[in-house]
Image (cartoon, grey):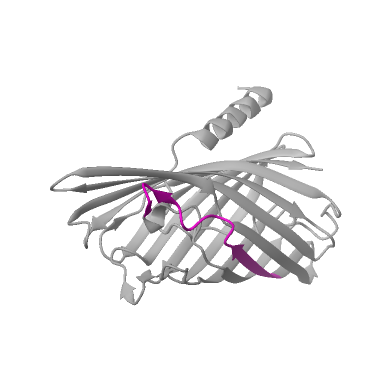
Amino acid sequence: MNMKSAKCLIVLTAVIGCFYTVQLDACSVCRCGDNAFLFSERGFGLPGQTELQRFWFSVGNLYSTKSNALTGDEGTGTERQREIRPSLRMAFNPSQHASFMLELPLQYRRIVVTTADATDRERSSGVGDLELSTVWTHTLSSNNGRFYTGGLAIVAKLPTGSNNLRQMGERLDEHLQAGTGTVDWQLGAAASRLTCTSRFFTSVYYRRNGTNDFGYHYGNAVLFNLGAERPLIAGLTGSLQVNGRYADRDHEIADMVENTGGWVAYISPGLRLSLTQALGISAAVQVPVYQNLYGVQSEKAVLSTGLSVTF
């Protein structure tokens, strides 16, 4: 297979991945992975290589499924959730040290509740919650072509999605709402070692979630990441990461919500292809290697894809 054919195959795979089967982590508000440093166009490029005063756009889609045991007023059984999440991301680099990014998703969700008595299905759709990120990076030291970089990030999630979607006059389940109805904050720090041919990086985040008007509070979470990337052939870069998350249990009013929260860790290989100087695509898969979740929950593999354009 020649280089042109290989690029076409990767492009086709990424495009199909944007619309086909993906399985996402169980927490519906905290995705595993680095959603500020690595999603910003600035990233951790070598000093002097960042294109300033440029806009970067990305579109993608996630298809997610989750299942957990069901107890409470609905009866005893199983609850299965499915979500299709196309999103638009935009980043801007005003200086060598700062980046700003926003992400606006659309939500298409379905829940199937199965008990001994019946099987019920409910659907919803709508604009999701807007995330705004600010990333600051600085070169800490350099030695023989090796650059050591540190960074800080702050992320705010705003309640642009409706948290009061109704059907037949009744408010839908919390996990069918397009937004969480809260202002949430996420703080992070990262470090990176770069050369002309490779990069090693690590980051950690703490996410503080609010409580909405209906008394629901998604559990606060810690996200951690460790990874490396290296060029494979001209225009193609490979990466390997460990992505993990610990989330507290959710609470509704003063009651703890069963089958929420816990530990999970993934091994995540990925590829990034530069088609032109301004156009690129990426794809990565997260494979769960450790789970210690509260109650009865199931985590599956995660596939993420993206198409980015720089102006």
- In the image, residue 33 sits, relative to residue 224, either above or below, namely above
In this image, 141 relative to 158: left or right? right
The percent position of residue 270, horizontal first and vertical second, equals: 56, 45
Report how many numbered discs are placed on residues in the image.
Answer: 0
Say above or below: 200 vs 2. below
Magenta segment boundaries in residue numbering: 151-171
Assess whether residue 82 is covered by the magenta stretch. Answer: no
- 53 and 130: which is toward the camera: 130
In the figure, is residue 123 to the left or right of 106?
left
- Pick the quarter of the image with the C terminus: top right
Q: Inspect this view and state whether residue 264 appears.
A: yes
- Residue beneath the point at 75% across and 47% down: 56
Residue 70 picture location, percent across and down: 24, 57
Do we see residue 108 in this rendering? no
Q: Residue 248 appears in which quarter of the rendering? A: bottom left
Name the residue located 30 percent from the left edge and 42 percent from the top edge: 121
Q: Residue lying at the far left in this picture: please name it.
A: 116
- The residue drawn where x is 13% and y is 48% is 116
Name the foreground residue: 94 vs 131: 131
Relative image position of residue 77 (x, y in whole percent): 19, 53
Q: Quadrant of residue 118?
A: top left
Asked if residue 249 is positioned above or below residue 131 in the image, the reply reads below
| Quadrant location, the N terminus | top right
Q: Identify the image quadrant of residue 202.
A: bottom right
In the displayed structure, does residue 245 sit left or right of residue 283?
left
x and y percent of residue 124 in the render? 43, 45
**Is residue 155 on the magenta stretch?**
yes
